[in-house]
Amino acid sequence: MVASRAQALRYLHVRWGINLSSTVVIVGDYGDTDYECLRGGIHKTLVIKDVCNESKKLHNNRSYPLEHVITFDSPNVVLADGCKKNQLSDAMEKLGTLKV
């Protein structure tokens, strides 16, 4: 079975009753093809910058910035500058999912 992340989130909510407002979806800024489906909703989204440099080569012809697809104005969407522990924990704190 193949499903997008949006379909997987819906399944978790419908089948298992998981509260999506406490769910964090982690994506890279390149290589993901279902941004449009993940942009809305009550789940939280953590976008990690420069995490998949090999995909950058494949997507060099992308003529639009990431901000045209996913908005960073929402409190449910945070951009992490990298994938080091402190960068991820800072981003999770901004989302309100990690209490220090």
Image (cartoon, grey):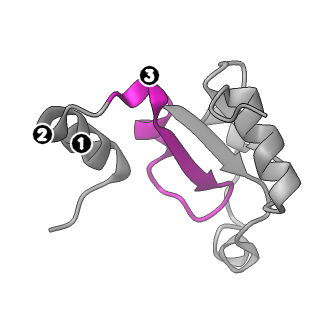
Whether 10 is drawn above or below 21: the answer is below
Q: Nearer the viewer, mark 2 or mark 3?
A: 2
Q: Which residue is mark 3?
A: 42
* Residue positioned 27% across, 49% down in the render: 8
The amino acid type, in three-letter code, at marker 3 is Ile
- Give the magenta range: 19-39
Q: Is residue 16 left or right of residue 33?
A: left
Q: Can residue 47 be spotted in the picture?
A: yes
The amino acid type, in three-letter code, at marker 1 is Leu
* Residue positioned 68% across, 54% down in the render: 29
C-alpha gap between disc 3 and disc 1: 14 Å
Q: Which residue is mark 1?
A: 12
Q: Quadrant of the N terminus?
A: bottom left
Q: Can residue 81 be spotted in the picture?
A: no
Q: Around disc 1, counting alpha carbons within 10 Å, would you say few (fewer than 14), some (14 to 19), or many (20 or more)?
A: few
* Residue positioned 58% across, 38% down in the render: 45
Q: Quadrant of the C terminus?
A: top right
Front residue of 94 and 28: 94
Image x and y of residue 52, in percent: 70, 71
Give the structural element (helix, strand or loop) at label 3.
loop
Image x and y of residue 62, in percent: 67, 57
Image x and y of residue 93, in percent: 75, 32
Front residue of 22 and 61: 22
Q: Around disc 2, counting alpha carbons within 10 Å, would you say few (fewer than 14), some (14 to 19), or many (20 or more)?
A: few
Q: Is residue 100 left or right of residue 1?
A: right
**Label of residue 78 in the image:** none
**Label of residue 15 in the image:** 2
